[in-house]
Image (tube, rainbow, N blue to C red):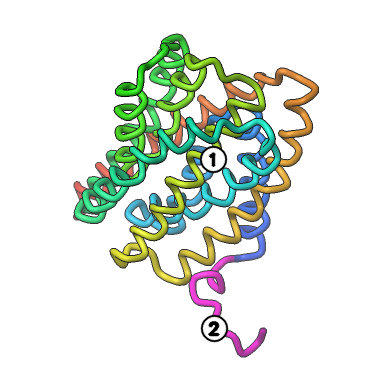
Amino acid sequence: MSGMDLGLLGSFSVTTIVLGMAVCFAAGMLGGLSGFGTGMLVTLFITPIVGAKALIPVISVLMLINNGSRAWFFRSAMDVRLILKVAGAAVPMAFLGALFYVRLESGMVQALLGGVLIAAVPLRRWVARKEFTPGPAGVVAVGGLYGFLSSVIVGAGMLVIPMLLGLGLSGPALLATDATIAVLVNLSKVIFFGGLDAMSRDLFLLALLMGLCTIPGTGCAAWLVRRTHARLHTALIEGLIVLGGASMMLGAVWSGLNG
């Protein structure tokens, strides 16, 4: 490989690579246990490396792989009809969200992402208490909103979980259905962002490698889900998310003052 141009990957130290692999493994495992936290934890690590503007395209590739592995591990429990209904509404709206995202200024993106990370903790707790049983129109509305927001912010998937719970899904069925919806939406986002020139080859390769590192963690989570009800990691995830979001917002303010 001595004659190969490694581009962005060649600029990483061994320490950064090892730390990145560990973060992705842990994020895959934690997200596999609860359906929450994978993208947000990886965001805290990857944003200083790729920049805020490239974050959503990179996360789309990573989460495509992560959710693909989760869907595979729980494949026998997925609700195909519900997946098609939600994804059918989400994919077109994800394209509109991608168009909106690529037109945002980098500083605005960083501030937006920081604010979303901070708000995600109380919002997740509020949403978790709001299980509801939507009709056909409600499924389409939630799917469309999820699709648009998933192209703009990290953590939009938290909108889907309460709906699936309200429709009677739980355990492996919940994880499999949620993951497969995310696979279809993130696959469309990868295509959309690629067509909009929002993701270079180097960034795609970086996201691909990081996504692959989440698979063993997801496998461990699948083993644990069948045997435990692990929730001890939630407080740690929320603390990291709030601190990371505050850091991103402060960075955006600092850049604005010095720009």
The quarter in which the C terminus is drawn is: bottom left
Q: Which residue type does callout 1 highlight?
A: Thr
Query: Residue 255's x, y, as percent?
Result: 25, 50
Magenta-highlighted residues: 1-12
Please tell me in which quadrant of the rendered image residue 223 appears: top right
From what the image shows, is residue 222 above or below residue 122? below
Q: Residue at x 25, y 42 (%)?
A: 253
The quarter in which the N terminus is drawn is: bottom right
From what the image shows, is residue 244 above or below residue 170? below
> Is residue 11 at least partly visible in the picture?
yes
Residue at which label 2 appears: 5
Residue occupying the far front of the picture:
81
Relative to the observer, which residue lies in front, 253 or 152? Answer: 152
Please tell me in which quadrant of the rendered image residue 192 appears: bottom left
Which mark is on residue 180?
Answer: 1
Mark 2 vs mark 1, foreground winner is 1
Q: Which residue type does callout 2 highlight?
A: Asp
Please tell me in which quadrant of the rendered image residue 148 appears: top left
> Is residue 250 at least partly visible in the picture?
no
